[in-house]
Amino acid sequence: MFELIEKVKEVNPLVLHYTNYVTINDCANTTLAVGASPLMSSSFEEVDDIISVCNSVVINIGTMNSELVDLYVLVGKTANKYNKPVILDPVGVFATKARTELTNRLLNEVKFDVVKGNVAEIKFIGGFDVKGKGVDSFDEDEDATESIKKVSKKLECIVVATGKVDVVTDGNMVYKIYNGTQKLKSITGTGCMSASLIGSYLGCSEDKLEAATMGILTMSVCGEVADIDNPPIGTFRVNLMNEIYGLNVEKLDKYAKIEKA
């Protein structure tokens, strides 16, 4: 799995983003840092043209915009038409009725390869009770592995749930990642950036479970290493991007704390 960090640089996959405007710059830079090529769009007119040539598609609903609801659905369906891997990041799905309805529509009309969210977002999609506020999860201290596996089986795709321990599963096999730092919650966009990393690896690998796992492992390991000297938050943010850019197999071998079940 770790060799994907080299493969993504060799392939330089084109990762198409339909994402929120709060974190769009960080998502683009993260995609570049890991070795992929970002492309951002919010246009109906070019959907078919660019999805036909991209390697993967990321849909992120973080900035709720009613005018883009139909666009997200069209993007998802077009990705399915061209057999392009597509990732959904249902940011704040439990925060408002509009976000819930959009997520449900997307899940009903589009076949996603990966659905990525924090523990509360994933549990909410699965119909479980959650503790959260806005885009933040308060469920992170519990072991929700079995619940997350059930959501994966229900959605028939890879499900990623980030928390104190990150869980990635196809409903049967599970990867648990024990890396990370609390500071990853103290800067905006690390979840969105993780979806970009997943898209980058999905764009160069047939193994969707490993690609999704590597996306989350990259963020967790790089966040942990970036915080080794306990820098102030602005420095940490810069360190994080530098660590993603410099990540290699040797560093993963040294720092990755990952368990397969």
Image: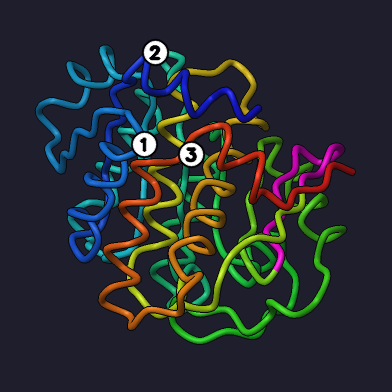
Stretch of the chain drawn in magenta: 165-175
Marks 2 and 3, how far apart at CA: 19 Å
> In the drawing, what numbered circle is on residue 82?
2
Q: Are marks 3 and 1 in contact (CB under 8 Å)?
A: no
Marks 3 and 1, how far apart at CA: 10 Å
Q: Are marks 2 and 3 in contact (CB under 8 Å)?
A: no
Which type of secondary structure does the marked residue at label 1 adopt? Answer: helix
Query: In the rendered image, which quarter is residue 1 located in?
Result: top right
Where residue 136 appears, as percent x and y from the top left, is 50, 79
For mark 1, what is the residue?
Answer: 34
For mark 3, what is the residue?
Answer: 198
Does the magenta run of residues contain 170?
Answer: yes
Tag 2: residue type? Tyr
Tag 1: residue type? Val
Of labels 2 and 3, earlier in sequence is: 2
Which of 162/78 is in front? 162
Dot 2: within a 10 Å radius of its alpha carbon, few (fewer than 14), some, or many (20 or more) residues?
Answer: few
Q: Is residue 69 left or right of residue 185?
A: left
